[in-house]
Amino acid sequence: MEQAEKNIAQEIIQEGEKCLVRYRSRYGRASYNFYRPESWFPGGRILRRSNTFQPTDDIDDTAIAYRGLKDAVAFVPEIREALEKQANGSEGKFLKRGPEKYQEQKLYNTWIGSKSLFVDLDLVVVCNVLMFNACYDLEKSELDKSNIEFLIDAVQSGLHLSEKWSLCAWYPMDEVILYNLCDLIQTGAYPELDCIKDQLIKECRSHIERGLLPAARILTENALMKVNETEIRTKDVGSLASFLNESASFTFGVIPLLHPFDGRTAQRISSSSWFRMHYRCDAQMLTFLIEHEILFRNSEH
């Protein structure tokens, strides 16, 4: 990487750290939220008035934030303790959705810092927490081992894609699921996951051959390059403006409004666009585009 590019990268990192502070827990904890403390469901004139829809801190945003922060080691024990305390079944509360075989397994809960919310499970969130653990070189706990077993079983059984509205309700897009699994494998921190690598590569290739939106294709190609598969690559994405315009319909994550409610009917209709808010961010799409270029450069050496 040229020095000029390194300077730009460093500037992005510094600005990102400044922004992260704005998403720190409103309750003074070391955890983070998807929304800023002063914004309770911004733009939702009706939903923001209901406690049901007011977001709490979650382990996903917290894990991602700590991967981007410097000098945050002092807060890691607090986060680690919270993860253990609020794991599925640790306080007598268990999962009530998704495949029954996971409902009593010791798994990470999506929420952190709130005992009033239902216990939740999301495969992509689990990947992010294990990435957080790897980032800080934390000793592998029994809870970590249980979550690794869950990921292996979900992929080998095909549930990671066939049951994505119950196992990945916040990230129910195949490309996002495959990307995060490959991202976790490339850390090398969990060699146990190597047994699902070939299957993930096959699924990524299958999705690309099927035809994808530009953003989805870039994400899937990034996943392949993370696990050292470089045969398939987009050579030209066109202008940034056209890339962003063509990627407008791609959604990285969603907020499933019916997810808090138990019951088959609620879960069956939760995948409808009427009952979910889509998350899209141009800056995120550009980040994946930059990552795509860096991964390709690295693959050439």
Image (tube, rainbow, N blue to C red):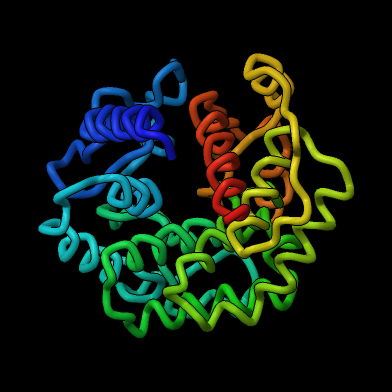
Q: Kindly indicate the quadrant of the structure image that contains residue 226.
A: bottom right
Q: Residue at x 46, y 19 (%)?
A: 44
The percent position of residue 95, horizontal first and vertical second, equals: 50, 68
Would residue 289 appear left or right of 138 to someone viewing this image? right
Q: How many marks on residues?
A: 0
Measuring from the top left, give residue 286's x and y in whole percent.
54, 29
With 37 as the anchor, is 123 left or right in this view?
Answer: right
Tell me: residue 300, above or below residue 181.
above
The C terminus: image quadrant: bottom right
Relative depth, front residue between 184 and 125:
184
What residue appears at the point 68 percent right and 32 percent down from the top-left corner?
A: 250
Q: Residue furthest right?
A: 210
Residue 107 is situated, as x and y percent measured from the top left of the image, at 44, 73
Above or below: residue 132 compared with residue 4: below
> Residue 86: percent from the left, percent from the top?
31, 66
- Between 256 and 6, the one lying in front of the other is 6
- Quarter of the image holding residue 98? bottom right
Q: Is residue 244 above or below residue 293?
A: above
Q: Is residue 74 left or right of residue 65?
A: left
